[in-house]
Amino acid sequence: MSDTSAKRLAGQVALITGASSGIGLGVALAMGAAGASVVVNYRSDAAAAQQVVEQIRRGGSQAVAIEADVSKEDEVQAMFRQAKEHFGTVHILVSNSGIQQDAPLIDMTLEQWQQVIDVNLTGQFLCAREAAREFIRRGIEPRLSKAAGKIICMSSVHETIPWAGHANYAASKGGLMLLMKSMAQELAHYKIRVNSIAPGAIKTPINQEAWETPEAADRLLKLIPYGRIGETEDIGKVAVWLASDEADYVHGTTLYVDGGMTLYPGFIGNG
Ligand code: NAD
């Protein structure tokens, strides 16, 4: 029987990157509520990360904050070393860190291009590589999970929807789609499950200007057939399910959690 209990991730360690805000914060809280011990990675906001740690602890799970820039190889390796020193191992990676540096193509600087690729794509490679090394070293612990480890990449609807004015971001997420699938193909025989979550519009600091005024929210809602902007909890619940054995046969796929944003809503009543 699959475990559908509230604490279905008890005994497992989940490392969430970019967990001091937004979706990463929501995922970290959901993982903690599901019984996982949580590594709250942050890049610069130590105080915010510590608050997340304390909230998870108040809920009865363990947590620790670890600083690292996911685009730096030595920092990612140090983060995994610290996580293993603290909790012994890692079972779940939610590679969530991401940035936008928006500009029309003809004005985009190489720095804007490079920063987004470094965090959103190279960061995914570096974190997944360290996670896979640890999952393979440790192997399956049958009392905890059928899989040796789970990698969940935070992608975006823009892994498939082109996005004018955001070519660097869309390229990073499109690249992430084939990185995820290639890793899934390569790591399956180790019983490592690899998937992506592609959020639509979720209320977080990254897209605040798109929902903070009623006019902006109305414009955004035209792109969402289901008629509401997403909350970080919507993603947290899916991440917990995807990390659990309930999703044991889900491998190499992107789960769109977008209220229908990928359904070409411009065709409603048109075309
Ligand atoms: P956010 O800005 O709140 O979160 C991004 C997090 O990444 C922050 O905590 C930030 O500190 C961290 N980060 C940035 N650079 C980092 C680095 N070099 N090393 C470590 N951490 C770093 O925004 P969010 O919306 O929560 O974004 C989280 C993820 O979800 C991103 O990958 C984003 O592309 C994706 N996403 C968000 C939406 C949305 O609507 N909010 C939609 C689709 C995809």
Image: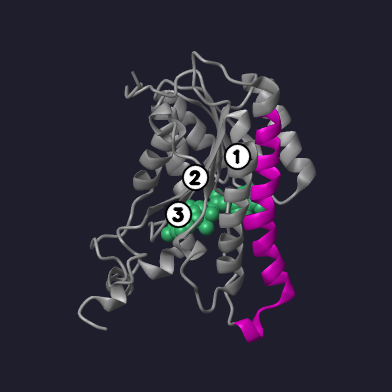
Is 125 left or right of 37, judged from the image as shown?
Answer: right
Q: Amino acid at mark 1?
A: Asn
- Tell me the tag on residue 41: 1
Range covered by the magenta-colored residues: 105-134
Q: Is residue 69 visible?
A: no
| Residue 217 coordinates in the image, percent (x, y) | 30, 69
Q: Is residue 149 visible?
A: yes
Q: Which residue is mark 2?
A: 24
Q: Amino acid at mark 2?
A: Gly
Q: Which residue is mark 3?
A: 198
Which image quarter is the N terminus in? top left
Q: Are marks 1 and 2 in contact (CB under 8 Å)?
A: yes
| Residue 248 coordinates in the image, percent (x, y) | 44, 31
| Residue 53 coordinates in the image, percent (x, y) | 51, 31
User: Is ligand 1 closer than 8 angstroms to the Cβ of mark 1?
Assistant: yes
Q: Residue at x 71, y 45 (%)?
A: 126
